[in-house]
Amino acid sequence: MKKLIAFVLVTFILLSALTLTANAADIVNGEQIFSIHCAGCHINGGNIVRRGKNLKKPALHKYGMDSIEAVSSIVTNGKSNMSAYKDRLSEQQIQDVAAYVIEQAEKGWR
């Protein structure tokens, strides 16, 4: 029984480490995608088209865009002046850039 518990614990730790590594890689990929496709309008989390609709944490919260799912949806489908990227980016790229936006918002875009 002790060996089984030890095996489960070690397996859990290894899977957790792999997930963290994948998430870090996703954020790096998201940063690259953001710099190519998004930074022109959203430099440092701002918005050159509509100042109040930026990517800063308070604005994301105010407009219900403070989750990876919400950011992914607007990147995929666009809205108002925001272009849709579903034909330019893969689903994984959209998820990566959304994760990057949420992480940067949490950090205050520093």
Image (cartoon, grey):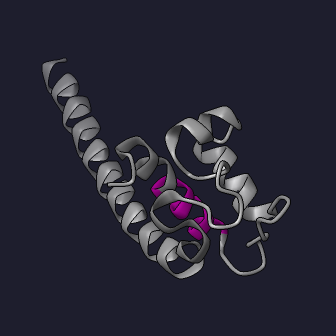
User: What predominant SS class does the magenta segment belong to?
Assistant: helix
Asked whether 70 or 45 is in front, the reply is 45
Name the residue located 70 percent from the left edge and 66 percent from the top edge.
Answer: 49
Residue 99 in percent (x, y) is at 50, 53
| Location of residue 41 with respect to 47 vertically, above or below | below
Magenta stretch holds residue 37 = no
> Which residue range is magenta in the image?
91-100
Asked whether 106 or 73 is in front, the reply is 106
Residue 54 in percent (x, y) is at 60, 52
Name the residue located 47 percent from the left edge and 76 percent from the top edge.
Answer: 35
Residue 8 in percent (x, y) is at 26, 31
Magenta stretch holds residue 92 = yes
| Quadrant into which the N terminus falls | top left
Q: Residue most toward the right?
A: 80
| Location of residue 31 with respect to 58 vertically, above or below | below
Q: Inspect this view and state whether residue 104 appears.
A: yes
| Location of residue 5 with respect to 45 vertically, above or below | above
| Quadrant into which the C terminus falls | bottom left
| Location of residue 25 with respect to 12 vertically, above or below | below
Name the residue located 80 percent from the left edge and 62 percent from the top edge.
Answer: 78
Asked whether 85 or 110 is in front, the reply is 110
Question: In the shown orientation, is residue 81 left or right of residue 88?
Answer: right
Residue 56 in percent (x, y) is at 51, 46
Question: In the shown orientation, is residue 17 left or right of residue 70?
Answer: left
Which image quarter: residue 77? bottom right
Name the residue located 29 percent from the left edge and 57 percent from the top edge.
Answer: 21
